[in-house]
Image: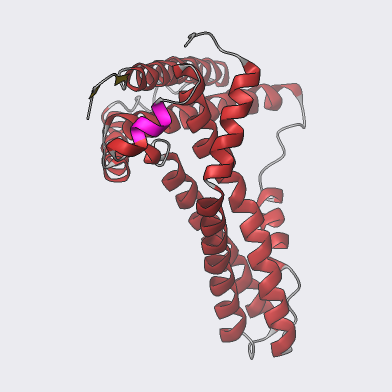
Amino acid sequence: MKNRFQLKRFGHLMTRTLYGEKGQMLTKFVGLTAIFFVAMALTVWTQRDNPAWAREGAYYQITAFCVFIASMACFVFFTKVFANLKTKEQRVAYLSLPASPLEKWLGRVLYACVVLPLLVPFAFVAGDLLATLFARVMGVDYVMAGCANYARLWSQIPNPFKDAEQMRAAAAVLYAMMAGGLALNALVLLCSTVFRHALLMSIACVVGLTFLLVGAVTDGQMPASAPLTQGQAEWLCVLLGTLALLVAAGELWLSYRVFRRLQVVPGRFTNL
């Protein structure tokens, strides 16, 4: 099998992956929809006799809770990148497919890190729609309040496009945050590749990294007499973001290298 990347062959691999995982995808979608619906329906039920202002506050809080649940669901999905390689039979079946190692690795990464997280917003809308139908039956004024409050959450983010200076500062902070998020997701992906108990090890690594970062920031606080200027803070964000991108690239490369060590040899299966 040639090791070079072929788009047509990769498309066939992704089609096979999606077709083979359709049952799991449906189960995850129904489960997320049920979680969102139960959370919203319970809020509608408990707040049915309260005044309008109290109901609106409760709906806003449950929307924030659903956003937290959605984030946790995406985190769990990232740990399921190579869940199809748990047993010897599963590994032989997947690693024997007519595709290059890069195509197999990238196919699983796209499935777990792109396709599965896309189920979350659709499940949220479906759960909110079911909650709206439930509210209509109960005679409560609730019309897709979850989606409306989610848009409200985004609208509360300060607008950085007032002048060029604020735009530059916002771009630097956004760059650092996105690069840091990518590095964190790549760490979870690496844990999913290396460890059998990917979820537990990912949680342990993230918690340990959080403690290290908090300790570093606490111990390395600058004196109050020498604060950073805005320009220095922007450059610091850019440097930290670039460092995070390099770390993410290294983590992805290590994940791919570990995946390449999983080989099917005639009469023998390695790296069990």
The part of the chain drawn in magenta is 91-95
Q: Main secondary structure of the magenta part?
A: helix
- Location of residue 149 by image quarter: bottom right
Of residues 93 and 75, the one nearer the viewer is 93
Q: Is residue 167 magenta?
A: no
Q: Check the picture and name the quadrant holding the C terminus.
A: top left
Residue appearing at x 55%, y 19% in the figure: 234
In the image: residue 140, left or right of residue 252: right
Of residues 226 and 165, the one nearer the viewer is 165
Q: Residue furthest front?
A: 267
Residue appearing at x 42%, y 31% in the figure: 94
Q: Is residue 15 above or below residue 119?
A: above
| Residue 34 percent across, percent down from the top left | 55, 68
Q: Is residue 49 above or below residue 190?
A: below
Residue appearing at x 73%, y 68% in the figure: 144
Q: Count of labels shown?
A: 0
| Residue 219 percent across, percent down from the top left | 26, 29
Of residues 245 and 193, the one nearer the viewer is 193
The scheme the figure's colours follow is secondary structure
Q: Is residue 98 above or below residue 148?
A: above
| Residue 135 percent across, percent down from the top left | 70, 82
- Location of residue 38 by image quarter: bottom right
In the image: residue 163, left or right of residue 270: right
